[in-house]
Amino acid sequence: MKQECPHCHGTGWRPVEREGSRAVEVCTCRQQLYERGADQRARIPKRYRQCVFESFDITFAKDESRLSLDNALMQAKGFVKEYPFVKKGLLFLGKPGVGKTHLTVAILKELMAQKKADCLFYSFQELLQQIRDSYNPVSLSTESGVLRPVLETDVVAIDDLGANRVTDWVEDTVTYILNYRYNQKKLTLITSNLPDNPKDVQERSPSGKYRIGDTLTDRVGSRVRSRLYEMCSLVSIEANDYREQVLSHQR
């Protein structure tokens, strides 16, 4: 049996005192229900729906890692604070598990809750697959029902950019999406596990499982990387596996 909210008794409104007068305001239970619905509409996966700024715990990190994580957190919060007047999106780069997706989802959740922005979350592989699946061989085009929200939504997050190796079709598709959003002044959040500098590939290949030469440009093409320079501010996270350290810290 569903438990009734003790504050509003199921009405969605709770009584409050304001300057000696009684009034009502939206109950927290209604707000929580709205936020859960917003997460679903934004396509945020269930695994990440608890990702908020408050749960981004960096107290366990060593000095250098903590500085990098703290800087990433500050930039993420600054993006929310400045929205909708912020000029660029954010490009989070770093090894797997350093908190890139956590911060990206936290930004979306704050924008939806505080600024009532329309947001969408896609993994790079999922986005490409959905576009492929919607391709109409008769008209030689992609159904607008899939692509249109990616183009028009206020803030779109693309997680794990470069997870697929570049092909002409992949580069053309991503270039089209990014160019359209850039020209329409839409904000885009990007995460990638791939290093931006060829030097970093050699340093990270034994532990990061990258082959020599696997930079972000190698995976998405020079046109896409060039556009990202123009439309996103770089947030490079130099830290060890965030998830692993959180679990270790909790033991």
Image (spheres, helix red, strand yellow):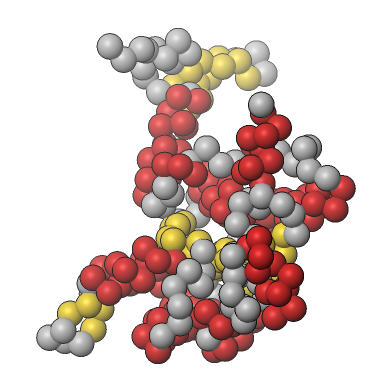
Q: Position of residue 212 (x, y in %)?
A: 63, 78
Q: Residue reaching furthest front?
A: 206
Tell me which residue sits at (41%, 85%) in the image: 167
Nearer to me, 11 or 118: 118
Would you say residue 176 is visible in this rendering? Answer: no
Residue 232 in the image: state x and y as whole percent. 64, 72
Q: Position of residue 100 (x, y in %)?
A: 61, 55
Taking the spot 42% from the left edge, 42% from the top edge, the residue there is 46
The furthest residue to the left: 138
Can the viewer see residue 29? yes
In-front residue for pair 198/28: 198
Residue 22 percent coordinates (x, y)? 55, 14
Q: Is residue 140 above or below residue 214?
A: below
Residue for point 56% across, 42% down: 51
Number of marks present in the image shown: 0
Q: Residue at x 51, y 72 (%)?
A: 162
- Dividing the image into 4 quarters, which one contains the C terminus? top right
Left or right of 133 on screen, residue 21? right
Quarter residue 153 falls in: bottom left
Q: Is the residue 45 above or below the residue 176 in the image?
A: above
Image quadrant holding the N terminus, namely: top left
Comparing 151 with 225, the one in front is 225
